[in-house]
Amino acid sequence: NAGVMQNPRHLVRRRGQEARLRCSPMKGHSHVYWYRQLPEEGLKFMVYLQKENIIDESGMPKERFSAEFPKEGPSILRIQQVVRGDSAAYFCASTLGPPEYEQYFGPGTRLTVT
Amino acid sequence: TQLLEQSPQFLSIQEGENLTVYCNSSSVFSSLQWYRQEPGEGPVLLVTVVTGGEVKKLKRLTFQFGDARKDSSLHITAAQPGDTGLYLCAGEPGAGSYQLTFGKGTKLSVIP
């Protein structure tokens, strides 16, 4: 997983709480992608960010989900008022940037909503 | 919506056997990547294929991209227990989009 770091690795939240997932890309990478993996499903694209910019959020639910990648610090995926259906593994990947197409993934955050 | 179908979904074989897993689509991809994912971990990139008909070898693993860039295969020779894992293919549509479209994967189990 070549240096992409995610934390926490496991997160348990009660329905209605907020979940914050963090992703630090590989050194030198300024492009971050977030994916969600539901049980028995493939990874689904959520959002693509560059530093301080959201480039493509077409895969992210319109409500309760937001993402940011500030100039300093990790990328954050925020889920407000979590519901049981949000339980999944959330992965981020980083690249040097297009046209560099090889995405390197972090270990993921397993979110469980009780 | 571009879809990638992987087959078989599950595969259990004895150590030393050969196997092939497939990744098929009706859509064209500008590149296709193969990943391996261990339980509780993120996908690890194995290879990227870009050119139609391209064949890449990684030790006992041989990857092929179809001539039309719609399908790919992964062949493992003399499988070992260490090859056990979930094999995912992911396609990049190109044309300015860098969203990877993933298949659901082939879960491989190599029995000693």
Image: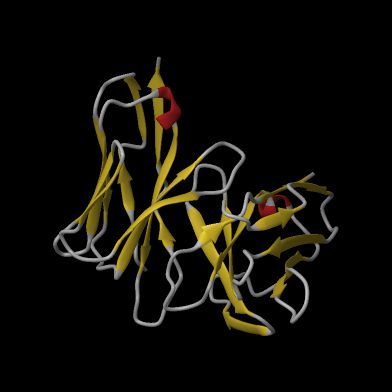
Question: What residue lies at 61% left-to-right and 77% top-to-bottom?
Answer: A49
Left or right placement of residue A53 versus residue A113 in this view = left
| Above or below, comparing residue B1 to residue A6 in the picture | below
| Above or below, comparing residue B21 to residue A34 in the picture | above
Question: What residue lies at 34% left-to-right and 66% top-to-bottom?
Answer: B2
Left or right placement of residue A38 versus residue A12 in this view = left
Image quarter (top left, top right, bottom left or bottom right) of the C terminus of chain B: top left
Q: Position of residue A80 (x, y in %)?
A: 79, 66
Question: What residue lies at 41% left-to-right and 26% top-to-bottom?
Answer: B109
Residue A27 falls in image quadrant: bottom right
> Which of the pair B76/A59 is nearer the observer?
B76
The chosen color scheme is secondary structure
> Which of the pair A83/B3 is nearer the observer?
B3
| Above or below, comparing residue A22 to residue B40 in the picture | below
Count of picture labels: 0
Question: What residue lies at 78% left-to-right and 72% top-to-bottom?
Answer: A73
Image quarter (top left, top right, bottom left or bottom right) of the N terminus of chain B: bottom left
> Which of the pair B69/B82 is nearer the observer?
B82
Q: Position of residue A88 (x, y in %)?
A: 64, 49
Q: Position of residue A89 (x, y in %)?
A: 63, 50
Q: Position of residue A16 (x, y in %)?
A: 84, 58
